[in-house]
Image (spheres, grey):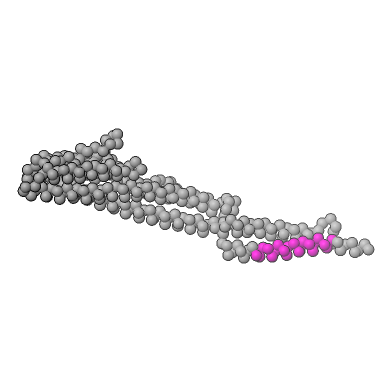
Amino acid sequence: MTSINTNSSAMAALQTLRAVNQGLNQTQNHVSSGYRVEKASDNAAYWSIATTMRSDNKALSAVSDALGVGAAKVDTAYTAMDSAIDVVSDIKAKLVAATENGVDKAKVQEEIGQLQQQLLSIAQSASFNGENWVAGATGTKSVVSSFVRDGSNAVSIKTTDYALSSGSLGNVLFGMTTAGAVETSTGILGTSSGATGSIYAMSITNFTAGQIQSALTNVEAALKAMTSAGAALGSLSKRIDSQDDFVNALSDSIDSGVGRLVDANMEEESSKLSALQTQQQLAIQSLSIANSSSQNILSLFR
């Protein structure tokens, strides 16, 4: 039956056209944004996971920046310790020279005095961002190393610690006062040892041969402690570099994983777009035919 009030064919064609247009709009959004899941309404589960992991990736980016700052601190400390080792080695050479009969110990002491002041200058200058790891009181320095989300979804920040020790066999050149000034009476170079005093404060002008030998022994012990501290700083620097590489690789993996969940497959979307455009044209043609069928009723009344 044909009715002039109800055109079932046109309604069916219109429903088809609406569905095709809806699919076409969705596909065009996927193509333009590059996302298959852009909003929670697209897929609530995938959107939730992606949002959480993107937030974690921002935290990892901050960790990478913190590792860069930490690496700079450690590298500054290592450079200072390495330079101080060279200076103390020069002091050792001067002491050996002073053991020779007829050598003017006062002249040798003038050279040693300049080297001692150089050691203080190195310790005072080895600061990065307000932190000095070669001149400091006994305590712990920390570098942010990772952001962790465990199996129960609890988050935490992990740090890499470096303990400072201001004793004669510790790992800092000098100690530091509570006011932040270098304390020349503590640390590897500042702690007094026996009658010869500390490496920093000793004066060999009136030393006997036995005292010079004692001073040599003290210098050798200081070099051993400084070498150990330099090795520890070098190991820490290597660990920070490795952790930074891991954090960057982890961030890339998270980006890749999130992409698998929410990114649009452009090859698939391209094929779907072409198909929907064809369907749209056919639906429009079908609707046009359905609408024109009612005009044929007029011929019955001519």
- For image coordinates 51% across by 57% down, the residue present is 259
Where, by quadrant of the figure, is residue 8 drawn?
bottom right
Answer yes or no: is residue 121 visible.
yes
**243 or 51, nearer to the observer:** 243
Residue name at image x 57 percent, y 62 percent: 266
Residue sitting at the far left: 101
Q: Is residue 16 left or right of residue 237?
A: right
Write the start and end of the magenta stretch as one range. Answer: 274-294
Residue most extreme to the top = 179
The residue located at (83%, 63%) in the rendering is: 293
Query: In which quadrant is the C terminus drawn?
Result: bottom right
Name the spot of residue 47 as percent of width and height, x first: 54, 52
Q: Visible in this render: residue 168?
A: no
Residue 170, image x and y in percent?
22, 44
Q: Is residue 280 magenta?
A: yes
Question: At 67% across and 63% down in the image, what residue appears?
Answer: 276
Q: Is residue 199 left or right of residue 77?
A: left
**Percent coordinates x, y for residue 1 in the rendering:** 84, 62
